[in-house]
Image (cartoon, helix red, strand yellow):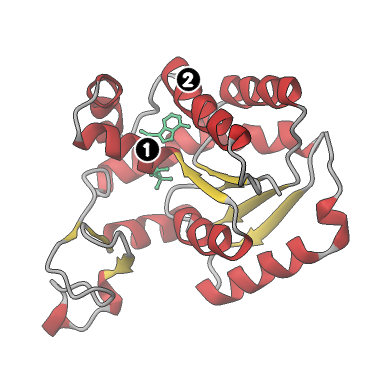
Amino acid sequence: MNLLIMGPPGAGKGTQAEIISNKLGVKHLSSGDMLRAAVSIQSELGKRAESFMKAGELVPDELMIEMILSEVQEVLESDSHAGFLLDGFPRTLVQAKALDRSFENNGVAIDKIINLEVDAEQVVDRLTARRVCGDCKSIFNVNQLSSLDSEVCPSCGSKALIRRKDDEESVIRNRLEVYFSSTFPITNYYSEVHSILNIDGSQEKDTITDFILGELEKPSSRVAEV
Ligand code: ADP
């Protein structure tokens, strides 16, 4: 099964993508995680992407398209390929059209687009409180950790809880603007050709997961639609 997950920054895409890809046995391809890994090793791509990410701007399309399409190709060529879940890509119409062309050439179809909807103020509240464990990569809301252990990862006990550089309020507001001007229009483009599952992303994490998995199990979700 081939899936896309979309929604504004802070909608919970990464969290849901991790759980759902594990449950379905599909490969989770997160453009943000790939870029952060490239920045941390200071690869050529990482060096070119870093300043855009810090400012909450989009990394140029040609870099993104090359990076993601080569990852998708690798998944398609692997023997154990059970599908993938793309998280954070496409983010512009140019990226969406490049992805469509690549899928067409490979005879691949998108089975479902999961679209998490959250309003802007909730995004700001969530992201200013977001911390990521530098060791096990779990994601937490600092307001939900007790004050005594707010420095310690509740999942693995590491003291490496970090705040992402782009989770500062002015950068979050810029990411939201970029989302509404560049990424949101893709949902209209996709709604003409693909099946989109719109979900209220302000609900409890488990409620959202159960809903998505329930919808994906319905037989119609398995019908290829291109
Ligand atoms: P979020 O969805 O919370 O904003 P991500 O981890 O998906 O965060 O992305 C972090 C940053 O990486 C983005 O703000 C942007 O700079 C860059 N990025 C990720 N995916 C793309 C993409 N498809 N196109 C352009 N830039 C991207």
Visible residue check, residue 4: no
- Pick whichever of labels 1 and 2 is earlier in the sequence: 1
Image x and y of residue 65, in percent: 50, 22
Q: Is residue 112 above or below residue 180?
A: below
Q: Which quarter is ligand 1 in? A: top left
**Which residue is painted at 29% across and 39% down in the image?**
36
**Which residue is painted at 16% across and 75% down in the image?**
150
Read off the residue under disc 1: 34
**Which residue is painted at 72% across and 54% down in the image?**
197
Could you tell me which secondary element the residue under label 2 belongs to? helix
Indicate the quadrant where residue 134 lies.
bottom left
Image x and y of residue 203, in percent: 55, 72
Read off the residue under disc 2: 66
Q: Is residue 174 left or right of residue 26?
A: left
Q: Are there few (<14), some (14-19), or many (20+) residues within 10 Å of tag 2?
A: few
Viewer-proximal residue, 198 or 135?
135
Viewer-proximal residue, 165 or 33?
33
